[in-house]
Amino acid sequence: MKSQEKTLIYWSIMNYKDWNLYLAATPKGLCYVGSPNKPFEELAEWIKKHIPNSTLIEDSDRLQPYARELSEYLEGKRKDFTIKSDYHGTKFQQAVWNALCEIPYGETKSYSDIANLINKPSAVRAVGAAIGANPVLMTVPCHRVIGKDGKLTGFRGGLNMKERLLNLERQSK
């Protein structure tokens, strides 16, 4: 039976300067980028919740193309990603994540801007929750969403990471 088949999820750890990031991908594409220096359990918990019938397999060779593009981005040498992604979320979350991918490199939008982009102007809080649930940091650029007043707001990777990514994009623009 098809429903009994386990999804294979390959994972690896990417080291970049003072950050260690867990990466995970299905055969369809990148499905998870962890927060800096968080334990493996962050990845394992996310997988258990979002892709429950799965098997985690460590495979740095398979994750190498994803790690390379993320490293190039962090070095300021890449503004767009060509790697495939495999988003696991509700239709609403995926609509929000797709809208985030439309924010140009080096620019920011507010939560209400994103709500308007997906034609749900009254759903600002739900948009915020969907952004907070983004499993693929950097490639789905939730760091480009800031408060309406221009202040940095919550970010799964931490405000230090958000600030570093925004500064990187401003300098490399």
Image (spheres, rainbow, N blue to C red):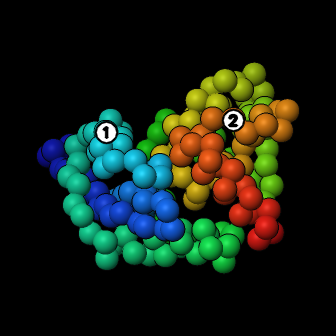
Which image quarter: residue 41? top left
Q: Is residue 4 visible?
A: yes
Report the residue marked by disc 2. Answer: 153
Q: Are marks 1 and 2 in contact (CB under 8 Å)?
A: no
- Which of pointers 1 and 2 indicates the residue nearer the eye? 2
Number of numbered labels in the structure image: 2
Disc number for residue 26 = none
Percent across and percent down for residue 17 are: 51, 68
As displayed, is residue 57 above or below residue 65?
above
- Categorize mark 2 by other alpha carbons within 10 Å: few (<14), some (14-19), many (20+): some
Type of the residue with mark 1: Glu
- The residue at the point 69 percent across, 50 percent down is 163
Disc number for residue 45 = 1
As displayed, is residue 146 above or below residue 60?
above
- The residue at the point 66 percent across, 57 percent down is 165
- Specify the quadrant that holds the C terminus: bottom right
N-term mark: 1 or 2: 1
Type of the residue with mark 2: Thr
Which image quarter: residue 128? top right
Q: Is residue 119 visible?
A: no
- The residue at the point 60 percent across, 68 percent down is 74
As displayed, is residue 100 above or below residue 113?
below
Which image quarter: residue 118? top right
Give the alpha-carbon distance from disc 1 to disc 2, as whole Å: 24 Å
Mark 1 lies on a secondary structure that is: helix
- Categorize mark 1 by other alpha carbons within 10 Å: few (<14), some (14-19), many (20+): few
Percent across and percent down for residue 104 are: 77, 59
